[in-house]
Image: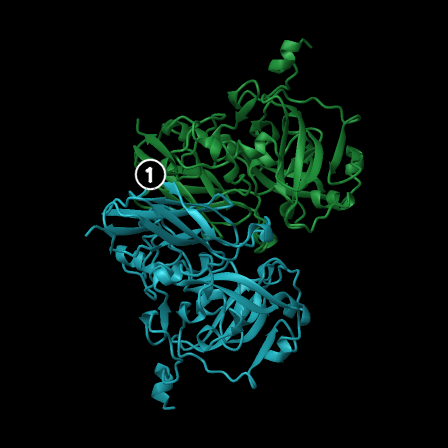
Chain colours: A green, B cyan
Amino acid sequence: MSSAKKLLGDYSNEPSRRPELVVNSKEPFNAETPPPLLVKDFKTPVDLFYVRSHGPTPDLDVSSHKLEIGGEIKPAIELSLSEVQTIGQHVTIDATLTCAGNRRNELNAIKKVKGVGWEISAIGNATWTGVRLRDVLLHAKANIDSPHLHVEFIGEEDCEEKTKYGSSIPMTKAADPKGDVLLAWMMNGKPLTRDHGYPLRIVVPGYIGARSVKWLRKVNVIPQESQFVYQQRDYKLFLPHVNWDTVDALWDSAFSLSELSVQSAICEPEKDQVIAKNSPYTIRGYAVSNGRRITRVDVSLNNGADWETADLVQQDKREEKGFDNRYWSWTLWQFKVGKFPSPCTICCRAWDSSANTQPEQARNIWNLRGVMNNAWHRVEVRDH
Amino acid sequence: MSSAKKLLGDYSNEPSRRPELVVNSKEPFNAETPPPLLVKDFKTPVDLFYVRSHGPTPDLDVSSHKLEIGGEIKPAIELSLSEVQTIGQHVTIDATLTCAGNRRNELNAIKKVKGVGWEISAIGNATWTGVRLRDVLLHAKANIDSPHLHVEFIGEEDCEEKTKYGSSIPMTKAADPKGDVLLAWMMNGKPLTRDHGYPLRIVVPGYIGARSVKWLRKVNVIPQESQFVYQQRDYKLFLPHVNWDTVDALWDSAFSLSELSVQSAICEPEKDQVIAKNSPYTIRGYAVSNGRRITRVDVSLNNGADWETADLVQQDKREEKGFDNRYWSWTLWQFKVGKFPSPCTICCRAWDSSANTQPEQARNIWNLRGVMNNAWHRVEVRDH
C-alpha cells in the first residue's frame, strides 16, 4: 500500500453492502436504514443495520487476532477468540444500539453542526451472543467492586483522526451482572460481519453506540475515563450559544455521554410523504430508553396541540424483564388513523418508566456536536 | 372518641409545628417549606421538611408497636423496633424525598386538577438511618431474586379514604443492594418525629415519596403491585384530554409512578418578587433526578430564549458515588447575575447523566391527577 493511501485511509477492501442502505458518507462508510424498513421487523436484519465507522473497515484474521486485557491488569493477558469463548457462560441478549448523533440532521437544519449527517435510522435492534464482560474482568482478577475505575475498549479501526478507536465505560456498568455488557461474536445468530466488528466487539446495552467498540483489540482497566478523543470530545453536550471558538474551555467540565435519554421517531410516513386526505393510514415508529420500559407513546396529528396514545406493538416481554430496568430492546408502536387529515404535521413523543419524556423543540437542545437530539419527532405530510 | 369524630378523623392530637411551614391543608396536615428556606441548607431541617399526610397523625407507642412481615412470608413474622434494629447493619444515607404532586399548582392554573395544592417545596433532603429492607427480606427468607415480586408497605395512618395507607415497590428495587431502600428510624440523626413516621418508616431513594410509607405496620411480599388506591389510582399519568368521565377505562393500563423524572426549580427569587432593575442578584434552586447525577442546570433570564449554566453548589460527592447512579440527594445550584434585567421571566431546566432534560411547557404534560410536573420552572420577576 502506498503511504499516501495509508495517510488518507485505504478503502480498496471494503465489504459489499445492500443497495437499500442510505449512505451518509462513503469513506469512512456511514449508512442508515430506510425508515420503513427499520420498523418492518423487531430485529433489524444485519445487512440493513446502520453502519458507523471512522476509517477503512478492518479485515481481521480470527486465527491470529488476539484480545489484550491490560491497563491495571499486570501483566496483560492475551486471549484468542476461542479462549474468550471458554471464559464464561455464553449469553444471548436483545439490545438496541443507537448513535448519539441519530437525528443530527434536524439540528443541522437549525444551525450547522459537526458530524455525520444522520436522519432517524442510526439505530437498530439485534440479538447479540457473547460472554459477559464481567466474567472476563473476573477472569483477569480486576477489582470489579471499585466504583471509581473505568474500562476502556480499543478497536483495530484506523480512524480518520489518525488514531485507533477508543472509548470507555464506568466499572459500575461494566461489572454489573444486570448491566448485560457483552464481548460479542454473534449478531442475530451468526458471526459478526465485518461492518459490525468481526470477529469480536463490545455491546453496551442502554448506552450510546460509541461505547460499543467494534473490532475489539484491547480492554484496559483504568483509573479514569479513556483519554481518546471519542470519549473526551465527540460525545458531549453544550448550551446552544457555545461555538467552536468558545468550546475549548468547556470540554473538560462537560460529561461524557453514556446512558441514553428517552427517544422516539416516526418511520412511516416518511417526511414529505403524500397521504390522500381522509384516507386510512397506519403510522409506525420506534421508541427506546436506557433500559427503562417505554410506558406510553403519544402521537399528534396537529403538531402537538392534541395527542392520542399509540399501540405498543412489540417490546421486550414484561414478564421476562420484570421491573429490572433491562428493557434493552426498542419498542415498536403504531397508530391507526381512519381519516387522515392531510396536509398536517405529525409528531410523537415517548415516556419511560421513570416518567421522563422528550423535549418539545430541537432548537432548545441544539448543541454544536449535534448529539442526543430527542425532541418530539415531527413529520410533515402532504395531500395530493 | 365519638364515632362521628372517628368517621371524619380525629385531629385533636396533632403535633406542634413550625409556623413558617406553608399549610396547604390543615386536616389532614399537608404543608411545605418556604422556598428560600428550602435552599438555605443542603440538609432540610426536620421541622421545615414538607409533610404529606392522608389522615390524623398517628401517635404510636414504640414499646408496643410491632412490624409484621407477611404476604408470601408464612407464617408472618412480628418484630419490635429493637428487633428490627438487630437484623442488619445500621446504614445511614442521604436522600431527597419528593411528592409526585410537587408543582401541582402550576398544572391547576392551566386546568383544574385533583390533589393537594403544592407549590415547589413538596421536597426535602435529609439523612436517614435504618437497616436495609434487603436485609429484613433476607431475614424473612423472601425470594429476593424473583424479578416479578413486589414488596408492599402498610402504615398505621387512618386515611380520609377510609383505609390504612398502603403502597408497593418492585422486589428488584427492594432487594437491590445498591437500591438503598431502608427501614429507617432516624432522620437527620434523631428519632423520627411523628410527622415523618415515628417510630419506623420506609425510605425509597429515587422513587416518588408516596412509596416511602410512614408509621410502618406491615411489609408484605406479594405477587403483584399493591391493590391500595395509593398504588392503583393516585399516582398515574394520563394524556391531557383524559378527564374524570373517561379515566375509569384507563386506570389499569397506566403505569404506577415509581422512579422520579429529572426535575429542577427556582427557590430564590420567589414568584412576583421585586428585584430592582440592574441590581446584582443570586438566583438559587434545586435539581434532582432518580439517582442519576445532575450534570448541568441551565438558567434563562428571558423565558428560555437564551441560557447560561448555573454553578452546582452542592451535591452528593462524586468521588463517593462514582458512576453508580446513586446520587440520591438533590443538587443545590446558584446563578449570579450582575445586572438583573427586571422585569423578566426566569426559567431553569436540569440535565441528568442519562441526558434527559425537562419538557418546556407544563400544558403539554398536564394530567388530571396533577402529578410529575417537571416542565421548565418559570418565575416572573418585577421591577419597583
Q: Residues within 10 Å of mark 1 (few under 14, many from 20)?
A: some
Q: Chain of mark 1?
A: B
Q: Quadrant of residue A341?
A: top left
Which x, y percent locates residue B167?
A: 49, 68
- Can you name the residue that lies furthest to the bottom here? B2
Which x, y percent locates residue A284?
A: 44, 38
Q: From this viewpoint, is residue A120 visible?
A: no
**Is the residue B51 above or below the residue A245 in the image?**
below
- In this rendered view, identify the residue nearer to me: A372 or B193: B193
At 30% from the left edge and 29% from the top edge, which residue is drawn? A383
Which x, y percent locates residue A90?
A: 74, 43
**Is the residue B372 above or below the residue A137 in the image?**
below
- In this rendered view, identify the residue nearer to me: B384 or B11: B384
Mark 1: secondary structure: loop
- In this rendered view, identify the residue nearer to me: A312 or A375: A375
Identify the image quadrant of the C terminus of chain A: top left
> Seen in the image, is A138 located left or right of residue A232?
right
Residue that carries the numbered disc 1 in the rendered image: B306
> Seen in the image, is A206 located left or right of residue A345?
right
Identify the image quadrant of the N terminus of chain A: top right
Q: From this viewpoint, is residue B122 visible?
A: yes
Q: Quadrant of residue A53?
A: top right
Amino acid under disc 1: Asp
Which x, y percent locates residue A115?
A: 49, 26
> Seen in the image, is A277 located left or right of residue A266?
left
> Seen in the image, is B375 located left or right of residue B225?
left
- In this rendered view, identify the residue nearer to me: B186 or A155: B186
Total marks placed: 1
